[in-house]
Amino acid sequence: MSLSSLSTKTKTYIGVAMGILGAILLFYLLIQTAEWKTDEVLQPYQNADMRLDKAVANYTPNPSFISASKFEVIKTQYDIAQSKKAHNLEIIELMNSYYFASTMLLLGLSILLGIFVLQISGSGIASKTHRFKSFFYTTLALTTFFGVLINVMNHQENIIVNKNSFLSYSATQLRIYNFLMTEGSEIDELAIYESDSTLGISNRVKVNAFITSVTKDINKTNNIFLKITHDKIKDYKEIVTYED
């Protein structure tokens, strides 16, 4: 059966189905594009992280400053911060890619919907063909869906909260790096600066006190944040409801 032999209504349904599938395909292509660009933008930051990881991993404890067992505790804290930071980054990349794809698709659909509305404004929708109405309502439905998706998924809030946690864990890792590389010589700014007679070194922070302070930092930041607000759907009644 050739396409030309199909009825106008059947062709319209096929066109609507292809339009919906095309929108879904474009949505996922935009997600892939956003993920690729995000990886590219974050590459310098990740390169710096790799250098930091290598420096801490290759650190040789100075027995006069820190014992091997205490260094392993601090190294474990560093790794915990790294794992939690990676979790935050995964959510950031996920939310960023979905936000980008939803926004770009919503922009395109809104422009298309505006063109349809201009066509309707003159003579009204009642005078339009079945094909026109089908494409108009499909575009309206897709525009509403992606508009609701942006609100329900709270992309921006999820990105901001997880970004703050990510940066906090990064700061904790830098504290550990700085502590190890300077042998605690700058710790007087952390309000835990005192002599450590157990190591025979004066004017140096106790390693146990530093470990405790890092644990507090991690606990303060520790959070799993992925917010979805389903009640935002009701706000979008305004899209299809005309109020005089």
Image (cartoon, grey):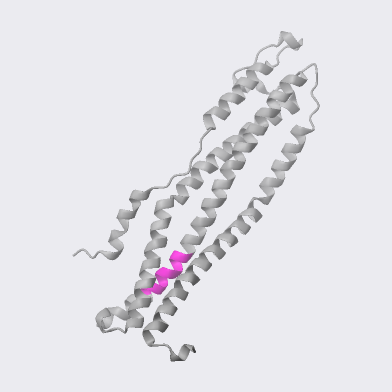
Horizontal side, residue 160 vs residue 199: left or right: left
Residue, far top: 197
Q: Quadrant of residue 142?
A: bottom left
Residue, far bottom: 5
**Between residues 160 and 154, which one lies in front from this camera angle?**
154
**Rendering coords of residue 220 (x, y %):** 52, 29
Span shown in magenta: 105-114
Residue 118 to residue 61: above or below? below
Q: Quadrant of residue 37?
A: bottom right
Residue drawn at the location 77% of the way across and 21% of the way down: 68
Residue 202 to residue 170: above or below? above
Q: Does the magenta portion include 109?
A: yes
Residue drawn at the location 51% of the way across and 35% of the way down: 223
**Between residues 27 and 210, which one lies in front from this camera angle?**
27
Q: Quadrant of the C terminus?
A: bottom left
Residue 239 to residue 220: above or below? below
**Rendering coords of residue 22 (x, y %):** 50, 72
**Rendering coords of residue 132 (x, y %):** 35, 81
Residue, far front: 1
Horizontal side, residue 175 vs residue 223: left or right: right
**Rendering coords of residue 32 (x, y %):** 59, 61
Residue drawn at the location 71% of the way across and 46% of the way down: 47
Q: Is residue 167 visible?
A: yes
Q: Is residue 205 visible?
A: no
**Between residues 188 and 153, which one lies in front from this camera angle?**
153
Residue 16 to residue 223: above or below? below
Q: Does the magenta portion include 36?
A: no
Horizontal side, residue 157 vs residue 47: left or right: left
